[in-house]
Image (tube, rainbow, N blue to C red):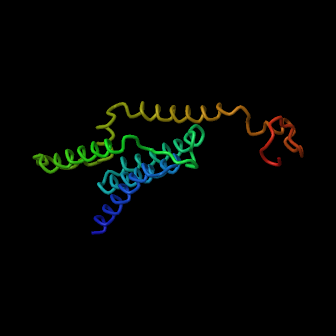
Amino acid sequence: MLTDVVFWVLAVVAVGAAVQVFRFDSMARATYALLTALLCAGGEVLLLGLDYLGVVIVLMMTIEMALMAVFMVMFMMNPAGLMPMAMVHNTRGAAVISVAVFAALASGILLTDWPRRRGGPPADPTEALGMSLMGPQMLTMMTLGMALFATIVGTVVLATRRGRYDRFGDGLTARRADDATRGGVGR
């Protein structure tokens, strides 16, 4: 009973947040609305008993959307939504296509003759899922994930021309910073 309530709450919030992605004028707000929808989808996966996959979805989407919000604020022309902008183009055509795709998928779900289950669940579903997704390449993928994370951090660090202590030089206790660029703390 409680599982059913949680399922429907997550489903409604996911759909509502997904709709808001296209309603917001701000790319940053749209990013966080998308994060909300994806976190609800991760919660649905957790409800299915796929703990490993659900946690991976939640962690991956949280980090991805946080980085996306940072890059949206840095590079988008209108990150805060100060000027009206549309997130969609050709709204009528997109609505027709969306309704047609939804109807096709829903009818496929309802009209498909689903096969009966054979066998039982594995003893360790997490291990079975990992082997099914990545096979013997699990260590490679974990190493690749850390390498990608290090690359992202390195890119952000190298993108800034000045470091944390550049304003004060060697004398970190100096009262006034010898800073050619105006602004910042104390200016």
Relative to 113, 105 lies left or right = right
Relative to 54, 118 lies left or right = left
Q: In the orientation shown, which residue stands out farthest toward the bottom?
A: 1
Where does the image place residue 29, in percent across and percent down from the top left?
A: 51, 51
Q: Nearer the viewer, residue 126 or 186?
A: 186
Where does the image place residue 101, in percent across and percent down from the top left?
A: 24, 43
Q: Nearer the viewer, residue 82 or 180?
A: 82
How many marks do you count on the picture? 0
Where residue 130 sits, quadrant-wise, is top left
Q: Quadrant of the N terminus?
A: bottom left
Where residue 3 sits, quadrant-wise, is bottom left
* x 79%, y 36%: residue: 166
* x 33%, y 58%: residue: 11
* x 26%, y 49%: residue: 123
Q: Nearer the viewer, residue 83 or 31?
A: 83
Where does the image place residue 126, in percent across and percent down from the top left?
A: 33, 46
Q: Is residue 139 above or below residue 99?
A: above
Where does the image place residue 65, in percent across and percent down from the top left?
A: 49, 45
* x 41%, y 55%: residue: 17
Q: In the orientation shown, which residue stands out farthest toward the right?
A: 175
